[in-house]
Amino acid sequence: MFQKDDMVVYGSQSVCRIVNIGTLSMSMIDRKKKYYTLKPIYQRDSVVYVPVDSEKPVMRPVITKEQAQKLIKNIPNIKAAWIEKEVEREQEYKKAISSCDPEQLIMIIKTLYSRKKARIEDGKKVTVIDERYFKMAEKQLHEELAYALEIPKEEIADYISGYMNKKPARQKQPKI
């Protein structure tokens, strides 16, 4: 169970602070049931209520700074995964985004980035579904990394690019 003031990731709301745990006095809800009251940190006027005993929603602690750095370092090892059938592909995107798993978000971003690039090279437009899920995955990932690394979310893309560009080149094996 989480505590008041814990920082969590909750679905598409991304990084949230638990501002209260208790019953709610709203019509149409069970007034005996306890809820987490979540305040998304990147959405000023939003408040989310999540039943404490709910098994369905995925809510987890925000990754640490060390975990964020390790995740960024591991980006090259996370494979893109393309699914041909559009309906199945969208279901996988939904599942990955609702999982709140940063590696799944990176997989979506890498997959859709490659697809976007290929479609543009072929003179085609990016599909609405691909663009929507790309933005959702990117937003969710960037917000959590920004919070964990204590930098503005607007700087995360540059931070990741800078890290990737600083990586030492692999040494070539000498020819024998």
Image (cartoon, grey):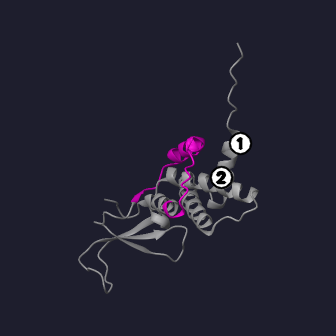
Could you tell whether 7 is left or right of 35 in the image?
A: right
- Mark 1, residue position: 165
Image coordinates for residue 152, horizontal then vertical, percent = 63, 59
Observer-nearest residue: 173 or 120?
Answer: 120
Q: Quadrant of the N terminus?
A: bottom left
Q: How many marks?
A: 2
How far is mark 1 from mark 2, CA to CA?
A: 19 Å
Q: Position of residue 82 (x, y in %)?
A: 56, 52
| Residue in front for this viewpoint, 79 or 65 | 79
Give the residue displayed 53% in from the left and 59% down from the top: 85
In the picture, the quarter occupied by the C terminus is top right
Mark 2, residue position: 114
Taking the image as drawn, is residue 1 in sight?
yes
Give the image quarter of residue 95: bottom left
- Disc 1 crowd rating (10 Å Cα; few below 14, some 14-19, many 20+) is few
Please provide the residue range marked out in magenta.
59-88
Query: Residue at image x 33%, y 84%?
Result: 26
Q: Earlier in the sequence, mark 1 or mark 2?
A: 2
Outermost residue, front direction? 85
Disc on res. 81: none
Numbered disc 2: secondary structure: helix
User: Magenta segment: does it hold 80?
Assistant: yes
Q: Residue 71, relative to residue 100: is it above or below? A: above
Q: Is residue 119 magenta?
A: no
In this rendering, position of residue 39 left or right of residue 171: left
- Splitting the image into 4 quarters, where does residue 22 fall? bottom left
Amino acid type, mark 2: Ser
Question: In front here: 8 or 73?
Answer: 73
Disc 1 marks a residue whose amino acid type is Asn
